Amino acid sequence: MLIVILDRDGVINFDSDNYIRAIDEWRPIPGSIEAIARLFKAGYSIYVATNQSGLARGFFSLEDLHMMHEKLESLVYAAGGEISGIYFCPHHPDDHCDCRKPNVGLLQRISQQSNDSLQGCPFVGDSLSDIRAAKAYGCKPVLVETGKGQKTLSQLDERIDVFQNLASFVDSLLNSTPTNTHK
């Protein structure tokens, strides 16, 4: 099965250091919705794995989060695509749960739902926690420069694929063009 895993904030939608707290604050990065639809049309199953500690911090409700995800899914659907599942960690970093990236609990759940190994599947993120979770679970880490990606790029001490944004990653994946790497 062809699977791509995406982080949410900073990859699909604009991120905020103050958290995305409401549906009207959730705004897609230009080209990201269409990129997800193109992946779907090419036969990929797309899963989202996102830390959402704003829930535990009381910045937004579970209903607010569901409305944001419904907006995402509806935009992708209108573009001709589909998201197979959205998995989120609602915990505070101090909770020491197994699902908060860089832990792999969200990836384990995706693997169980898809009934497939995620070994080698691209995991597109903008933070070190995304990169570390991908590596820990055997996924292929991919960094985008949107969101926190520029800061993360300056912290990397290993070679991974780096793309300007989600759309450029999808272009490369679907066209099998060589990728840029960072060391």
Image (cartoon, grey):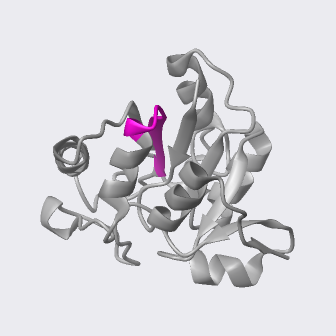
Residue 150 x, y percent position in the rendering: 60, 83
User: Where, quadrant-wise, is the N terminus in this rendering?
Assistant: top right
Q: Report the side of 142 relative to 73 (left or right).
A: right
- Give the magenta range: 40-50
Seen from the viewer's position, the closer of residues 51 and 75 is: 75
In the image, residue 21 above or below residue 117: below
Look at the image and tell me whether residue 87 can be seen: no
Seen from the viewer's position, the closer of residues 7 and 16 is: 7
Quarter occupied by residue 169: bottom right
Residue at 85% from the left image edge and 76% from the top image edge: 183
> Magenta stretch containing residue 48, yes or no?
yes
Residue 120 x, y percent position in the rendering: 74, 38
User: Total of numbered circles in the picture?
Assistant: 0
Quarter occupied by residue 16: bottom left
Residue 142 x, y percent position in the rendering: 66, 59
Residue at 31% from the left image edge and 56% from the top image edge: 34
Look at the image and tell me whether residue 114 can be seen: yes
Residue at the top extreme of this rendering: 115
In the image, residue 94 above or below residue 146: above
In the image, residue 111 above or below residue 13: above
Residue 78 x, y percent position in the rendering: 16, 45
Residue at 72% from the left image edge and 42% from the top image edge: 139
Q: Report the side of 110 relative to 103 (left or right).
A: left
> Magenta stretch containing residue 136, yes or no?
no
In the image, residue 157 above or below residue 60: below
Residue at 34% from the left image edge and 52% from the top image edge: 55
